[in-house]
Image (cartoon, rainbow, N blue to C red):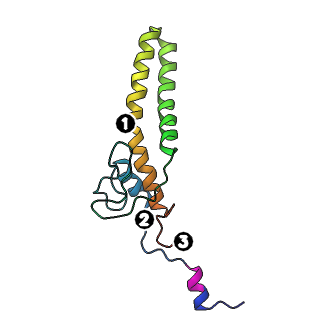
């Protein structure tokens, strides 16, 4: 079957602009819009805005779901685990004080990482044109 310009136009999905991955993720990590880097991406602690107040980029397409929570648990666990092991092998700390100190450290790290990872997940989706962020997606 010969290809014509009409069939090429129907199957070819040109990308209108390049969306570099790492600058977008860095903007998301700073809780800024992945498109412009100026507008805030979150309107409360974890609630993603429907659109950027500066560049009007639609952000309601995002589907971060549980990804940021899983990554937060993974990172905090890989930091606290070796610290706990080091404490118990090199010193003999009081279990109550160790439990309190490590619990506070887990909470502080989790509260710091969770919104930043959510911004990075939204930026990743925006950069890769996932979940409705693409110009040529149907539906």
Q: Is residue 113 left or right of residue 37?
A: right
Specify which label sits upstream in the sequence, 3 or 1.
Answer: 1
Secondary structure under the numbered disc 1 in the rendered image: helix
Q: Which residue is label 3 attached to?
A: 138
Local secondary structure at mark 2? loop
Name which of mark 3 and mark 2 comes first in the sequence. Answer: 2
Residues drawn in magenta:
8-12
- Determine if the magenta segment contains residue 10: yes
Find residue 107 and report its image quarter. Answer: top left
Q: Residues within 10 Å of mark 2 (few under 14, many from 20)?
A: some
Question: Horizontal placement of 121 versus 10: left or right?
Answer: left
Q: Earlier in the sequence, mark 2 or mark 1?
A: 2
Q: Residue at x 51, y 30 (%)?
A: 77
Q: Within the image, what quadrant is residue 112 found in?
A: top left
Instruction: Judge depth for marks 2 and 1 and give the one in front.
Output: 1
- Give the residue number, with chain letter if any, for mark 2: 19
Q: Is residue 110 above or below residue 59?
A: above
Q: Describe the element under mark 3 as helix, strand or loop.
A: loop
Q: Horizontal and vertical percent for residue 72?
A: 47, 37
The CA span between labels 3 and 1 is 36 Å
Marks 3/2: CA–CA distance:
19 Å
Q: Is residue 125 above or below residue 107?
A: below
Label number found at residue 15: none
Task: Check disc 1 and report the residue beneath it.
Answer: 112
Residue at horizontal 41%, vertical 16%?
A: 100
Between the residue at mark 2 and the residue at mark 1, the CA separation in whole angstroms equals 27 Å
Foreground label between 3 and 2: 3
The reply to whether the magenta stretch includes residue 13 is no
Question: Secondary structure of the magenta portion, mostly?
Answer: helix
């Amino acid at each position: 079957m010969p290809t014509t310009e009409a069939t090429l136009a129907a199957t070819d999905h040109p990308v209108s602009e390049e969306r570099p991955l790492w600058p977008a993720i860095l903007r998301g990590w700073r809780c800024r819009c992945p498109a412009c880097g100026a507008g805030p991406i979150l309107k409360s602690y974890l609630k993603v805005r429907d659109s950027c107040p500066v560049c009007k980029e639609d952000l309601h397409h995002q589907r971060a779901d549980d990804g940021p929570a899983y990554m937060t648990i993974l990172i905090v666990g890989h930091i606290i685990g070796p610290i706990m092991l080091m404490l118990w092998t090199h010193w003999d700390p009081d279990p109550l004080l160790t439990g309190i100190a490590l619990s506070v450290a887990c909470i502080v790290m989790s509260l710091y990482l969770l919104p930043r990872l959510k911004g990075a997940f939204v930026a990743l989706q925006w950069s890769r044109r996932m979940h409705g962020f693409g110009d040529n997606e149907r539906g």
